[in-house]
Image: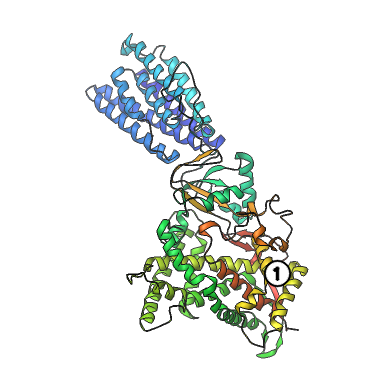
Amino acid sequence: MHDFCFTIPYGLILVAGGVIGYLKKGSMASLGGGVGTGLILILAANLSLKAFEKRKNSYFALVLETVIAAVLTWVMGQRYYQTSKIMPAGIVAGISYRWQPYSSQGRMTMLSTLTFTNFNRSDKIIEAQMVTTVKRFHYKNQQKKINNSLSVDIFYLIPFAISSVSLLHYHEHHHHSSPVSDPSFPSPNQEKKSPQRVPPGSLGLPLIGQSLGLLRAMRSNTAEEWLQKRIRKYGPISKMRLFGKPAVFIYGQAANKFVFASDSSNIVNQQVKSVSSILGDRCILELTGEDHKRVRDALVSFLKPESLKQYVGKMDEEVRNHLEMHWHGKQQVDANPNVYEFAEIQVLPLMKTLTFNIICSLLFGVERGTRRDKLANDFRYMIEGMWSVPVNLPFTRYNRSLQASARAQKLLKVLIGEKRVDLEKGASPRQDLITCLLSIRNEKDEQVISEKEIIHNVMLIMVAGYDTSSVLLTFLLRLFANDPAIYAAVLQEQDEIARRKPNGELLTWEDLAKMKYTWKVAMETLRMFPPIFGGFRKVVKDIEYGGYLIPKDWLIFWVTGITQMDDTIFPEPSKFNPSRFENPASLPPYCFIPFGGGPRICPGYEFARIETLVSIHCLVTRFTWKLLCLDNSFSRDPMPVPTKGLPVQISPRKLP
């Protein structure tokens, strides 16, 4: 009976040690290992106590202890270390019954220590010491009877409790270290190469990890500082848990090359669960191999420059209509078109409306009306929940985004059906993106892109174009208001183009080619204020980077801003200098990545360039504006959002 009185406190000590390790060091290894092992001991001790009181059920207790230990050990190994290569501690613990079926110290100590060893599976010394100790228990307990078991065995039990707590506390930063050789306990694997370590850091709480901390930092525009703090603490490579997945954070030119240029047999493009659930699993962000190439080629067939040339005029027309409705319309007084007052508007919401209308018109063929308004509302909700903790509970952002995604997909399915009928009636296959995708067929006259793939990729393009372009335009207008020299140079370039065109004539592809300085200003804005904070890749097999092991199925988390503000790449990075892009080809590769890089570079890059240049031309040649909020700060949610949506006072401008 006394044996069980010491086994249960031993379990409580392990539980307490695990909690202390987590509270003091943020160590999930301490929490998982200590609490799990301690609870195994307590549960097993109680089961064994009941069984021994009845005696005849002792084998039942043996089986229960063995199953409990094996299952919990495996679950914790999978949960906290993403490995199924476990030492069957529970089974070995069961064997300890045969060595000494009536010694609770021997049995419980072996059960707990071998379970703990599972969390430190590379440390052969601990394994050997534990087996030796169990044998010692076996030898000593053979010399006495069960009723005298409260003897010197306790001296072995107490050191185990203390050492286990210490090891659990120490475990977070060293559980993947190379095993230390010890001639007293030779191992058959001692001559093999030491296993690599996963990067330092902490996985944090299950599911949540560091997600909330990152999101808080993004919303307060301190995300780069938040990451720099991790870099100072752990170095340029560290592990974390984001949005339910274990991830490794890397940054810099070499990291970007590793992410964007790696073979798809090592790294594939996979977003966090919140993004993939909202956009769908058949968009090019999720596809790999031949599927990715097939769908990407279909998208590029419409989005390549040669195809987009014919849409410049239509885009110009859409921008002019938007300005007449939302900018000029804000100023007219008493229905007199010649009398104006200074009007106040919020730039960001209007830029979102503009980019959404352009995408709806050119890419989807959806004209103004109720359907476009519904789509706009649903896409706004979708974007809000894309970087959120993927817990699908009512009233959460994630839940609202999923519902909005379902509504948008339903509407797009109806739209695809209408486009298919138009094609059968002889409509041009180049009139919009959806019609183009429906018309692509292989040599067997089969549709190359499935309906599901069309829907998911249309949603991706909508989200990407809707938010990124509107953010870029908003920050350009803020820049022009804050920097008169930059504004004057852009205005001069755009006025020169406008003066050469007959009144009312739409822009052409040739006009865009003359907007070289304006695009350099746009690229410098993208460098300093990238709309996309970062992204994810999935590791499909164990790979090495920077001397560390990145385990299979982990994510790689990369960011844009830290590299683009690196003073070793861009001197005086905080100074706005468009001349950096005088010759974009001279930039070091994988340093300027607002559109990604490698074979997965954004296929909508050229569309975004045309959209930006046409919009800026129309804005600067027709309006002047003054900032009403001098606060130049912004938050990320997940895109950059200026304070109060950038309120400005606008007035019309006539071409000189």
204, 263: nearer the viewer: 263
| Way the structure is coloured | rainbow
- The residue that disc 1 covers is 517
Residue 42, percent from left and from top:
38, 29
14, 461: nearer the viewer: 461
488, 648: nearer the viewer: 488
Say if 256 sits above or below 176 in the image. Answer: below
Residue 539, percent from left and from top:
46, 47
Say if 68 sits above or below 368 in the image. Answer: above
Where does the C terminus fall, quadrant-wise?
Answer: bottom right
Q: Is residue 605 left or right of residue 65?
A: right
Residue 416, percent from left and from top:
39, 74
Q: Is residue 630 left or right of residue 613?
A: right
State the SS at label 1: helix
Kindly give the residue lying farthest to the top in the view shown.
Answer: 143
- Please tell me how crowded label 1 is: few (under 14), some (14-19), or many (20+) other residues with Cα within 10 Å: some
Where does the N terminus fall, quadrant-wise?
Answer: top left
